[in-house]
Image: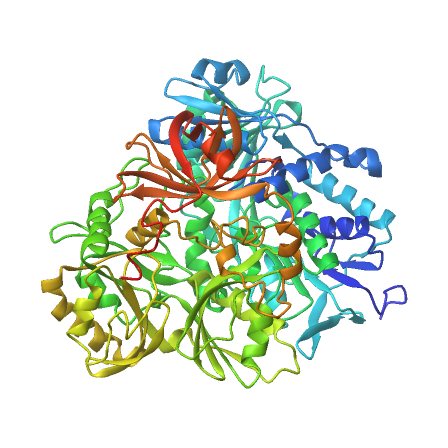
Amino acid sequence: MSSDLPKKAAVVIIGGGVVGCSVAYHLGLRGTQDVLLLERKRLTCGTTWHAAGLVGQLRATKNLTRLAQYSADLYERLEAETGQATGFARTGAISIATDSERMEELLRDAAVARSFGIKAARLSPQEVRDRWPVVSIDDIVGAIHLPSDGQVSPVDVTRALAEGARLRGATIRENIKVTDVLTRNGRVAGVMTDQGAIESEIVVNCGGIWAREIGRLCGVDVPLHASEHFYVITEPIDDLPKELPTLREPGSCLYFKREAGGQLLVGFFEPVARPWGMNGIPEDFAFDELGENWPHLEPWLAKAAERIPALDSVGIRQFFNGPESFTPDDRFLLGEAPELAGFFVAAGFNSIGVGTGGGAGKALADWIVDGSPTMELTDVDLRRMMPFQTNARYLHDRTVESLGLLYAMHWPYRQFQSARGARRSPLHDRLADQGACFGELAGWERANWFAPRGVRPEYAYSYGRQNWFDHSAEEHRAVREAVGLFDQTSFGKLLVQGPDAETALQRICAADMNVAPGRVVYTQWLNERGGIESDLTVTRLDDEHYLIVTAPACQVRDHAWLKRQIPSVARAEVVDVTSAWAVLGIMGPRSRALLETLTPDDLSNAGFPFASSREIDLGYARVRATRITYVGELGWELYIPMEFAQGVYDVIVEAGEPFGLRHAGYHALNSLRIEKGYRHWGHDVTSGDTPLEAGLSFAVAFDKGVDFIGREALLRQKKTALERRLVTFALDDPEPLLHHDEPIWRNGECKGNLTSGMFGHTLGRSIGLGYVEHAEGVDRDFIDAGQWEIEVADRLVPAKATLRPLYDPKNERIRA
């Protein structure tokens, strides 16, 4: 070992790009001085050095936008703090639209931006030219201007972060390669380098394009893949203004940025990308370029010249091609690994590493120091990923598409086209025969809607009523009026078993788990702040066995949370049994009548009450029938051993016609649950929301005699007026459609954003759920006294607001 290389550190960071240096800097701000950052070659040598340096602020969610806003604010003040220039300037950014659909997307984005505190203004074509004199505006419909967006020198800002980290006690060592990650008893224990071992209880993987390989050293899945990413820099352009905002033309996959000396950087997010590094990354790879590929860029260069005609008369000074890492869902990876305690990841930034690096570094440093996230980070939490998603072939095939999606239309309900078919229910082919149009979630192929005979089961995207709207409406009505069949096999299923199972779950669950076998309990898992870590059902199978059912995307997250919350001395274990059972949801007022023709078991209200579960005979199988609903109607979820699933499905479908049975997809499931006001974890409830704010206090057993996780925080919150509440909205106008994030207005003041939205076919109008915030408290009087509007693409639409469900508020139908 090198004589000056520490043998021990409180935190070891692997990777010296902008994100790794940001984590080191922010750990120093939090008082963690014994930080060691190791870089295999030189700082910034992987991806950071060749980044374009754009600092955009508007992101997919409010909290991710907060991270980007923080990055801009940090970069603006960092030079004064460290003495190291960053090159940061708030140049602003303009995004242009050449058709009405893209303009609607931009207007929706602008409305969200303003609700998040970002200035955003609509521009006419002439106003675009006023700011960009060399741009052609003949086909421009309009644009959006964000004046506070910025640009920065990626290398300089990384050096500034590194200097700031050193000033607070961090040690940074270059030319040291991590060769292994050391573990002990399910926890990280340090790293092995080419110069010796270093002990540490916290290791942070900021390895960029190497992050997946670093994770594999210790059995941690880090699903990302490198892709070639291109830009060109022109010769100087005459009369190019010295100060220009970043110009984006997403419809042509282009962005333009002024460089020093009147040069122009033209960047590309082409729809068919070129994955790189399939056979590994060369050992000596550092400040390398990947080589020119003019034929690949030719169509996009032609589009660039159409937008900036001056490009036809200037030469290209540099053709740049370098690797950037992309994830399967185009969102970065942040947080503690579910497989290994103390091992953290910050990687896979999908070309926004510089723009988000400051905020991401702060968020991860806070997580490390405080032991849990201090803000809601669901969208980027590493635990959303499934183990199969580190499969090299899968990542390669998805990366072909994922780069281009950053500038593609972000249509409502848009589905990935690549790397499909990874996980399939045993009923997949039967559903396809019924006309299923499949979407993907956590790798599962799920029927989103069903096309009638003669209609192609394919999406035709728009911001209006898409081609499946009427078909899904029929499915929705069938569930309300007769009976619908849902394939819910994708649900995550966890079995908790052992003599201490009840004791462990009583501490983890907010509801009371001391129930009789055969009872189903709807509950939340809370963090110490009272925030909702998961929203799920728990069925007591017998004295020592509980079945937990959760959302598909929460399978890994909830498994990891559960294992870490059960004390090591407890006689209880957790087994993921997701693949053991198929699940059919038979829902609607005629569901009982249908199922009674297929089983000798008593399904009456007295014999099989709501929230009960037991095994019944059905067809030739023995299945677990659970009377529960996520659609607001009488119904059962049938848990069927995988090998019996097709047979059970066949007998149900054969018997269903006289009862009006209709196959139904997840779009109908979503419209049904929103009408009923049922919450969806990850949208309506997250780790930043409490059950009291979410209207779920009925599911909290304060008096069960157990000090469950989060109880004290909820008791404190109960003593004060709730400053935010989840509210249901129904638009007065039946024409506009709601999706999510639309701003909520009360008496001319923005009070929040929708978390979910969809057209409610029973109610005949769009329904949304969203949090309303008011410092003096949000209660029924506050709701009733307000004039409410929802902003939809720059238009304010009057709406009715209520704290109660709009459909069946007394739950009479589900208990029929």
Q: Observer-nearest residue: 805 or 580?
A: 805
Q: Observer-nearest residue: 594 or 381?
A: 594
In what quadrant of the picture does the N terminus appear?
bottom right
**Color theme of the render:** rainbow
In the image, taking residue 480 as reference, residue 247 lies left or right, namely right
Q: Observer-nearest residue: 740 or 715?
A: 715
Q: Is residue 155 above or below residue 586?
A: above
In the image, taking residue 130 as reference, residue 539 lies left or right, namely left
How many circles with numbers are drawn on the protein? 0
Instruction: Tell me the quarter of the picture where residue 626 sits.
Output: bottom left
Instruction: Tell me the quarter of the picture where residue 175 sits.
Output: bottom right
Image coords of residue 815 (percent x, y): 31, 62
Instruction: Tell me the quarter of the picture where residue 147 sits.
Output: top right
Report the residue at 39% width, 77% height from top. Answer: 518
- Residue 51 appears in the rendering: no
In the image, taking residue 534 as reference, residue 761 lies left or right, namely left
Q: Is residue 196 above or below residue 346?
A: below
Q: Going by the picture, which residue comes out furthest to the right? A: 3
In what quadrant of the picture does the C terminus appear?
bottom left
Image coords of residue 188 (percent x, y): 70, 72
Report the residue at 56% width, 71% height from top. Answer: 562
Q: Going by the picture, which residue comes out furthest to the left? A: 658
- Residue 33 appears in the rendering: yes
Image coords of residue 556 (percent x, y): 51, 67
Image coords of residue 552 (percent x, y): 42, 63
